[in-house]
Image (cartoon, rainbow, N blue to C red):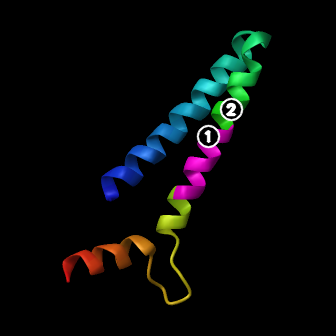
Amino acid sequence: MDLVLSIMSLAAVALVLGAIWLWRKDAAFRKQALLMLFLAAVMAVNVAIWTIPTSEGVTPVDQLEAQAGE
């Protein structure tokens, strides 16, 4: 699961950088650049959901790994 979260984080950064490059390149690609930024935001929120601890202090990733170990 850690590998998937790392890849999602790297992909989100790549999407933001690609969107900035497209935005500056040509006005015709602005819609695609906005969609790339939206996808990067969705991916970042998903990573945050899995890694931010709950009120008990345990992350959902830790809970999943604990259940898999049983």
Q: Is residue 22 above or below residue 66?
A: above
Indicate the position of residue 15 as horizontal and vertical percent values.
56, 32
Labels 1 and 2 touching (C-beta < 8 A): yes
Q: Which residues are magenta?
A: 38-46
In the drawing, what numbered circle is on residue 35?
2
What residue did someone put label 1 on?
39
The picture quadrant where one finds residue 68 is: bottom left
Indicate the position of residue 3 as horizontal and vertical percent values.
31, 52
- Which residue is rendered at x = 36% and y = 51% of the image? 4
Q: Is residue 30 above or below residue 56?
A: above
Please name the amino acid that badge 1 sits on.
Leu
Circle 2 — which element?
helix
Q: Local crowd at mark 2 within 10 Å, few (<14), some, or many (≥20)?
A: few
Does the magenta segment cover residue 40? yes
- Which residue is rendered at x = 28% and y = 80% of the image? 66
- Dominant secondary structure of the magenta stretch? helix
In the drawing, what numbered circle is on residue 16?
none
Please name the amino acid that badge 2 sits on.
Leu
Does the magenta segment cover residue 28? no
In this picture, residue 69 sits left or right of residue 25: left
Indicate the position of residue 10 as horizontal and vertical percent values.
45, 41
